[in-house]
C-alpha cells in the first residue's frame, strides 16, 4: 500500500513538474517570440526612438539680410545680441524659475509683471522674452545653470539695427516676433524659435521673404538632462538677401532734420529714371525701439499726438493739393482751346449765380493771363479757365499726371486719393455734379485729395513730359517711359509759369530761390484750407493763419523741379498746418535740392535751425520737469499688428 502511495506521489509530482515546465517553456517561447518580433520587425522603430532620445535636432535661424541705400550704405543691419527667453509649456515652477534667474539677472518688478503678462496672453508654446542685450558674463552664467532651468533658453542671435532711426522709420518699418495667428497659419517651427522676428511694416514687411533667408539645422547628442555632449552634423543657414533701395541715405537724413518738429513729408525723385531718392515722413517712431519693446506710455503718446507719428504721410496721407494743382487746370484749359494770352480781370471775387468765390488776394490781381496767373497764383483766373475746360477735362489731365493712382512700390498702405468727376459723385453720393464743385476743383480744393508721392510724380512728369513711374528697388529693371502725349507748347507754357513762381519778380516763391550758381528751380506754392471761412468772418476780416490754433491752419505745399533748363530732380513738400506754402514748404524744398548740388551749403543752412530747435525742446523739457511727476512706465507687448 505504501509502495502504491509513493508511486502516486511521484506520478503527481511528475505531472505538476511537466505542467510547470510546460508553462515556463510557453512563457519563455512567448518572450523569445516577442523579443524576436521587437528586434526583427520593430527594431527600426525603437532604434529611431532611442536615437530621438539621444539626438536632438535644433534649428539655426537665418541671419536677416541688410537693407542698403543706392550707394550700399546700411539702412537696416544686424548686431550680435545675447538674450534670455522662456517657453512656458516647458517650465515646471514658473516662480521658482524666475527666482533662480534673478540670482544672475537683476529683474525689476516691472520686468516680472511684464513676463507674467506675456505668459498669460500668449499660447504656452510661444517663447517669452525675459531680457535682451545681456553682457557676456551674464550670458555665460545663465548657460552654466541651464540644466537646472528647464524651459529657459539663452539665445545668441542678432538684433536689428537701424542707424538712421526715425528718419527712415516709415520707409523701412521694423521687425517683431511673429504672432500666434501667423504660426497657426503655417505651423512653420521657425516662427516659434526664440528670438526670431518678421518684418512688420514698410520695406521690412513687403520684402520679408528675400530678407528672411532659409533656416539651417544642427544635430547634437544630448544626455538624459538635455545637455549637449557633442555636435553630430550641421546644415548652415542661408542668410537673407540684401535689398538695395534707390534712396540716398544722406539726403533722407538731411530732409528729416530740415523738417525739424513739423508734421510733414518730403519726397525727391529723379525725373529721368523715376528713382525715389528721399521719402521722409515726420515725426516718426524709433524702429530700434519698436523692434524690441514699446512701453504703454510711449505707445499712448504716439497714438495721442496730433502730429500723427504712426502714419506714413508720404504714401498714406491725403491732402487737398491747393494751388499746386493749378498746372493741371492750365493744361486742361490749353487742351480745351483756351489761349494762354487771353486776359482775365481779377477784382478779388468770382460770381456764379448767387454765390461768390474768392481769390486769396482781397484786392485782386487786375488783368492776368496764364503767363502771369501761375506765378501770382490768381484764383479768379483759374475759376474762369477751369470752368471753360470743364471738370471731365481737368480730371482726365490730373490722372494723366499720376494723381488718384497707386504705384507698384514696396510700400504698404498707399492711399489712392480722389480725383473727382461727375461719374465719381454719382457713385459716391447719387447726386449730379455742380459748376460750383468744378470751381473748387480748379484751385485744388473740394473733393480733390492727393498724397505727397503723387505730387512728386506729377512734378517729374511735368518736368520730363514722360509717364515717369516711381521706383524704390534699385535692382529692379529700368524701363523706358512713354510720352504723355501732351502738346510740347502747352508744357512749355506751364513750365515757364512755374519758373516765374520762383524766379519772377512777382512769383509767390521768389524768396525761396536756389542759391546754387548756375542752377534755378521751377515750382508752385500751395495753401490748402482745412476749414471753411464764413462770409461773416470775411466781412470782419479773415484772421491771420498764425493767430488761429495750429490744427485749423492751412496746409503748406510746394512742388518743384530743378534745374529748370535740364530737369533732374522733382520734389514735393507738404507741411501739415504750415499756413503758407511760400514761407514754410518752399524753403524746405530749396534746402533739400541744394543738398543735391552743394551739400556743404545745405548743411550750413541746417545748423542754425537745429540750434533753435534744441533750444525749443530744452524749454519744453524744463516746463515738463516743473509739472507734476508722471506715474512709472509699464511695459506693453508692442504695437498692434
Image: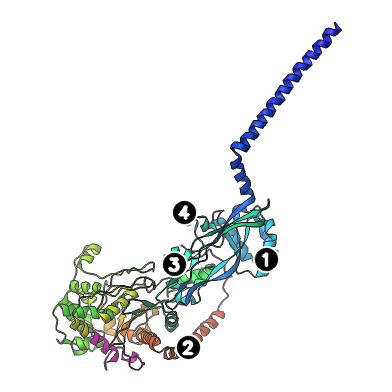
Q: Secondary structure at mark 3?
A: loop
Quarter of the figure with residue 419 = bottom left
Task: From the image, state whether disc 3 or disc 1 is nearer to you.
Answer: 1
Quarter of the figure with residue 209 = bottom left
Residue 569 point in image, percent of width and height: 33, 82
Which comes before the other along the chain, label 3 or label 1? 1
Task: From the image, state whether disc 2 or disc 3 is nearer to you.
Answer: 3
Which residue range is magenta in the image? 495-520
Q: Secondary structure at mark 1?
A: helix
The residue that disc 4 covers is: 186
Q: Secondary structure at mark 2?
A: helix
Distance in Å between CA atoms under marks 2 and 4: 52 Å
The residue that disc 2 covers is: 612
The residue that disc 3 covers is: 201
Q: Is residue 517 above or below residue 584?
A: below
Which comes before the other along the chain, label 2 or label 4? 4
- Drawn side of residue 519 relative to residue 118, left or right: left
Residue 117 point in image, percent of width and height: 57, 59
Distance in Å between CA atoms under marks 3 and 4: 20 Å
The residue that disc 1 covers is: 140
- Which residue appears farthest toward the right when viewing the image? 2
Which comes before the other along the chain, label 3 or label 4? 4
Amino acid at each position: 500500500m505504501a509502495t502504491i502511495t509513493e508511486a502516486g506521489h511521484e506520478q503527481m509530482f511528475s505531472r505538476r513538474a511537466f505542467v510547470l515546465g510546460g508553462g515556463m517553456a510557453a512563457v519563455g517561447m512567448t518572450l523569445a517570440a516577442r523579443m524576436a518580433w521587437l528586434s526583427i520587425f520593430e527594431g527600426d522603430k525603437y532604434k529611431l526612438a532611442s536615437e530621438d532620445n539621444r539626438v536632438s535636432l535644433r534649428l539655426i535661424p537665418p541671419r536677416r539680410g541688410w537693407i542698403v541705400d543706392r550707394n550700399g550704405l546700411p539702412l537696416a543691419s544686424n548686431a550680435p545680441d545675447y538674450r534670455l527667453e522662456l517657453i512656458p509649456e516647458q517650465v515646471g515652477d514658473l516662480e521658482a524659475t524666475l527666482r533662480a534667474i534673478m540670482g544672475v539677472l537683476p529683474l525689476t518688478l516691472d520686468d516680472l509683471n511684464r513676463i507674467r503678462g506675456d505668459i498669460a496672453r500668449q499660447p504656452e508654446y510661444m517663447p517669452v522674452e525675459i531680457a535682451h542685450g545681456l553682457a557676456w558674463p551674464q550670458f555665460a552664467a545663465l548657460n552654466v545653470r541651464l540644466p537646472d532651468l528647464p524651459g529657459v533658453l539663452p539665445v545668441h542671435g542678432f538684433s536689428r539695427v537701424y542707424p538712421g532711426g526715425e528718419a527712415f522709420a516709415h520707409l523701412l518699418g521694423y521687425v517683431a516676433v511673429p504672432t500666434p495667428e501667423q504660426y497657426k497659419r503655417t505651423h512653420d517651427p521657425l516662427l516659434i524659435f526664440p528670438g526670431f522676428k518678421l518684418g512688420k511694416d514698410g520695406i521690412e514687411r513687403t520684402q520679408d521673404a528675400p530678407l528672411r533667408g532659409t533656416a539651417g539645422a544642427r544635430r547634437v547628442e544630448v544626455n538624459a538632462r538635455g545637455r549637449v555632449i557633442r555636435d553630430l552634423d550641421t546644415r548652415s543657414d542661408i542668410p537673407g538677401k540684401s535689398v538695395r533701395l534707390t534712396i540716398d541715405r544722406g539726403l533722407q537724413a538731411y530732409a528729416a532734420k530740415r523738417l525739424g518738429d513739423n508734421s510733414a513729408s518730403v519726397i525727391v525723385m529723379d525725373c529721368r529714371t523715376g528713382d525715389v531718392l528721399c521719402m521722409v515722413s515726420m515725426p516718426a517712431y524709433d524702429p530700434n525701439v519698436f523692434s524690441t519693446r514699446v512701453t504703454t506710455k510711449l505707445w499712448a503718446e504716439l497714438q495721442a499726438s496730433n502730429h500723427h507719428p504712426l502714419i506714413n504721410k508720404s504714401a498714406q496721407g491725403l491732402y487737398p493739393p491747393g494751388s499746386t494743382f493749378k498746372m493741371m487746370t492750365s493744361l486742361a484749359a490749353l487742351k480745351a482751346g483756351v489761349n494762354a494770352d487771353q486776359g482775365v480781370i481779377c477784382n478779388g471775387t468770382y460770381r456764379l449765380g448767387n454765390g461768390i468765390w474768392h481769390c486769396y488776394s482781397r484786392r485782386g490781381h487786375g488783368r492776368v493771363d496764364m503767363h502771369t496767373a501761375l506765378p501770382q497764383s490768381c484764383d479768379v483766373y483759374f475759376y474762369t479757365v477751369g470752368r471753360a475746360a470743364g471738370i471731365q477735362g481737368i480730371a482726365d489731365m490730373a490722372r494723366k499726371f499720376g494723381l488718384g493712382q497707386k504705384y507698384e512700390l514696396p510700400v504698404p498702405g498707399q492711399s489712392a486719393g480722389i480725383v473727382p468727376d461727375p461719374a465719381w459723385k454719382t457713385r459716391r453720393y447719387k447726386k449730379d455734379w455742380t459748376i460750383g464743385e468744378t470751381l473748387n476743383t480748379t484751385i485744388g480744393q473740394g473733393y480733390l485729395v492727393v498724397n505727397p508721392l503723387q505730387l512728386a510724380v506729377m512734378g517729374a512728369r511735368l518736368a520730363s513730359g514722360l509717364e515717369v513711374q516711381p521706383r524704390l528697388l534699385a535692382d529692379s529693371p529700368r524701363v523706358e517711359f512713354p510720352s504723355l502725349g501732351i502738346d510740347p507748347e502747352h508744357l512749355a507754357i506751364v513750365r515757364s509759369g512755374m519758373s516765374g513762381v520762383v524766379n519772377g519778380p512777382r512769383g509767390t516763391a521768389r524768396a525761396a530761390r536756389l542759391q546754387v550758381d548756375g542752377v534755378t528751380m521751377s515750382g508752385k506754392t500751395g495753401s490748402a484750407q482745412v476749414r471753411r471761412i464764413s462770409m461773416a468772418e470775411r466781412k470782419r476780416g479773415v484772421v491771420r493763419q498764425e493767430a488761429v490754433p495750429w490744427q485749423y491752419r492751412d496746409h503748406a505745399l510746394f512742388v518743384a523741379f530743378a534745374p529748370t533748363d535740364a530737369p533732374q530732380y522733382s520734389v514735393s513738400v507738404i507741411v501739415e498746418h504750415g499756413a503758407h506754402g511760400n514761407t514754410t514748404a518752399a524753403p524746405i524744398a530749396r534746402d533739400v535740392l541744394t543738398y543735391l548740388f552743394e551739400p556743404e551749403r545745405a548743411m550750413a543752412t541746417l545748423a542754425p535751425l537745429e540750434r533753435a530747435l534744441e533750444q525749443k525742446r530744452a524749454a519744453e523739457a524744463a516746463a515738463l520737469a516743473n509739472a507734476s511727476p508722471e506715474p512709472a512706465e509699464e511695459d506693453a507687448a508692442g504695437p498692434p499688428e
